[in-house]
Image: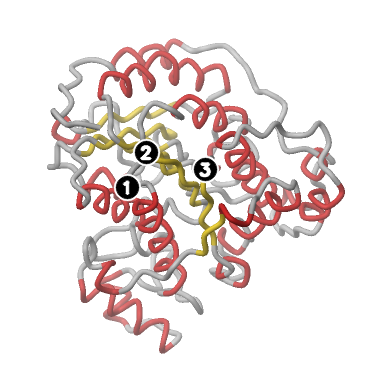
Amino acid sequence: MALLVGSEIYRRSTYGPKHPLAIPRVSTALDLIRALGWLDPARYHDSPVATPAQLTRFHAPAYIAALQQAEARGQATPEMRERFHIGARGNPVYAEIFRRPATSAGGVLLAARLTAAGGTVHVPGGGTHHGQPDRASGFCYVNDAALGLLSWLDQGLENLLYLDIDAHHGDGVQDAFRDDPRVFTVSVHEAGRWPFTGTLEDRAGGHARNLPVPQGLNDSEFLYLLNHALLPLIRQRRPQAIMLQCGADALEEDPLAKLSLSNNAHWAAVRAVMGLAPRLIVLGGGGYNPWSVARCWAGVWGVLNRYEPPGRLPPAAEAVLRGLTYHRAAGRNPPESWFTTLRDPPRPGPVRGEIRHIAAVTLEGLPDPPAAVA
């Protein structure tokens, strides 16, 4: 059975009222999981806060110190904004600007330790895949995924696979391991969307595959990529551990992307990779509609534990979803299904030729996996 890592810090923390991350996400997913009766307290772990020493395994010490200073002062200096992008470029100064990302990193590092000998851990607060060693990027102040992968490497593992299905390219993780053949990164993301990286031709020196998909990606197309590219690639690599970033911004209702998946696609990806490696960590990531994110990530936990979503949510779970507020257009008149169900209606459609081409190119010239014992 899987373990779940969370924290109460996400409940009270916000990036600011006008920021896309003003919404409650992790706390709502955890509340929904509990309201469904899906959480044995013995399988829940409170996330520790990563120390500066742990964070500087990947991040520059001066940058981590600047995050701490920005939190203590409640503002960024001009140097912080220019040098570290703190308080700039969509990365605001907020009350927990150090503690919240340090908590997400602490949770992923805990998950790496909990899976040292095998097992599965879900960390919905993780998945900050844009963070760079010396600066904030894309709402991400630290790169918890990179830190978790480094922790696995420090344990002696030599064949890791990182799979990212967020609507945005997992650029920070790919960049972190561009020169390390022990980590193979795979990203399925919307083509032409920020950070405008991750082209089909970008293979990061042979240690990556990128699948930039067109707008309107539907469930049928995602399943085609899963079955004709992602799973064959994973089976060829035979990884000792898989880290899956499950950003929910690829869902149709998300305001920051133009893909058209239902949460069934994310759950299918989780179900498919279970059992393909002795160690699995499933992260959260992007997602800016509170109902779609919470329902998706609660369902991820259900898949990991083989819980079947009810046809209609029990009253306690429904109350969690009805208690949300959302000030974008979708929040003014949300459909009743966002309150009463966990599973979206499937969103099938034709599989475009571009999708078939992406799948075929992904499998071309795959390098041999490192010779390692699982």
Q: How many C-alpha atoms fall within 10 Å of the one at disc 3: few (<14), some, or many (≥20)?
A: some
User: First in sequence: mark 2 or mark 1?
Assistant: 1
Asked which secondary structure carries label 2, the reply is strand
Q: How many C-alpha atoms fall within 10 Å of the one at disc 2: few (<14), some, or many (≥20)?
A: many
Q: Is residue 299 left or right of residue 194?
A: right
Location of residue 6 in the rendering, given as x and y in whole percent from the top left corner: 54, 59
Position above or below: 338 against 77: above
Query: Which quarter of the image is occupied by the C terminus?
Result: top left
Q: Is residue 187 left or right of residue 5?
A: left
Task: Check whether the beta carbons of the residues at disc 2 and disc 1 lie within 8 A of each other.
Answer: yes
Q: CA distance from mark 1 to mark 3?
A: 14 Å
Asked which secondary structure carries label 1, the reply is loop
Q: Residue at x 44, y 74 (%)?
A: 99
Q: Residue at x 52, y 59 (%)?
A: 45
Position above or below: 119 against 145: above
Q: Residue furthest right?
A: 315
Please tell me in which quadrant of the rendered image residue 218 appears: top right
Residue at mark 1: 116
Residue at mark 2: 279
Q: How many C-alpha atoms fall within 10 Å of the one at disc 1: few (<14), some, or many (≥20)?
A: some
Q: Residue at x 47, y 39 (%)?
A: 167
Q: Which mark is residue 2?
A: 3
Q: Is residue 122 left or right of residue 32?
A: left
Q: Is residue 63 left or right of residue 270?
A: left
Three-letter residue code for mark 2: Arg
Give the mark count: 3
Q: Residue at x 46, y 29 (%)?
A: 274
